[in-house]
Image (cartoon, rainbow, N blue to C red):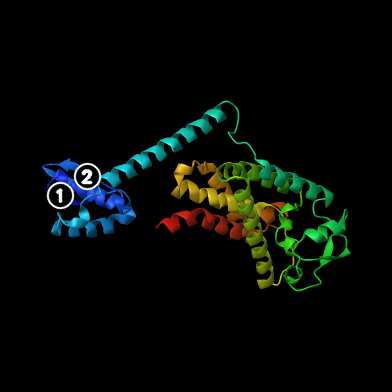
Amino acid sequence: MRHVGDLPSQDQAQRFVDYLLVEGVKTQYEAEDGQFAIWAIEEDETDRVKEELDEFREEPDAEKYRGHGVRAEKKRKAEEKAAREFKRRQVDVRTKWRRGGTGLKAGPVTKAFIVLSILVTLFTNFGSYSSEPGLLTMLTSEPLVPIGTNRYVRPAPYFEGILHGQVWRLITPIFIHFDPIHILFNMVWLYQLGSQVESRKGAWRYLGILLLLAVISNAGSVVWWQMNHEFSIGGGMSGVVYGLFGYIWMKTRYEPSEGYLLTQSAIFIMMAWLVMGMVGAVEAMTGVSVGNAAHFVGLVAGCGLGYLPTLLKK
């Protein structure tokens, strides 16, 4: 909060504050030594408030500053109501945690994605050709041909199968996981994050978000392999999970009234894992290749989806 100037009367201060609130800029005034100090609430709006204040001082009785009191009061009450609702939701969640629960209940879409991931992972023997090779090659981002134990070739250019109508390959790799820790990590985060989004957005809109994140993160992986002349059997829900993480992160920051909950420890864990994967630390420790492109692209896409409503309001 930053002090930007003073006005000589409470009437002028109130008129100025009401005008800016209707314009979408939050300010407040305080009586100080016979003057009324004007404060900008947001640091990044300080310059605009100063400019508006200079213009107001030149003609405080101008028509454009009049008649905003009722609208400003309605807006304040709406914001106060939203703040109370947000606080109530936080208290409800914390109370459930103290009682031994997470406060989360997975909806049908989240449950379906968890079950599908488990079944596909088991039937493909954790992404290995040793069991159901036909199923595995149907679900990967590109059609594959085995040339030995856990060795494959990609017989077609990147996106060849997809461009010939096999569009499911943009989505189905998310259900393939390559070891127990891989699927456990992703399913826990899908439950924690997905349940929040599904309960607020409804099953169909949530399903749309999941599918969009799957397409974007899988496509991002394929493009990355093509740029670096690599070949890999990409799989796992982590690109989608990072997308949900980014989506909720933006919602907690820019639309807190929606009641999403994301702890600082969760943010630290997700970002630390992302950075460790990108610098090669995870692969060095575990010997397992990490889908860094899917993680990063999914995160960016999720942040964009979460921030888009705020951007459109500006």
Q: Is residue 95 left or right of residue 211?
A: left
Please tell me in which quadrant of the rendered image residue 80 appears. top left
Q: Which residue is mark 1?
A: 7
> Split into 4 quadrants, where in the image is the C terminus?
bottom left
State the residue in front, 38 or 109: 109
Q: Which residue is mark 2?
A: 29
Q: Is residue 271 left or right of residue 66?
A: right
Is there a contact, CB below 8 Å, between mark 2 and mark 1?
Answer: yes
Picture coordinates of residue 52 (x, y %)? 23, 58
Picture coordinates of residue 76 (x, y %)? 32, 42
Find numbered disc 1 in the image and state the secondary structure of the residue it sits on.
Answer: strand
Please tell me in which quadrant of the rendered image residue 234 appears. bottom right
State the residue in front, 179 or 288: 179
Does 1 appear above or below 156?
A: above
| Residue drawn where x is 22% and y is 50% of the image | 67
Q: Residues within 10 Å of mark 1 (few under 14, many from 20)?
A: many
The kind of residue tagged 1 is Leu
Picture coordinates of residue 192 (x, y %)? 61, 41
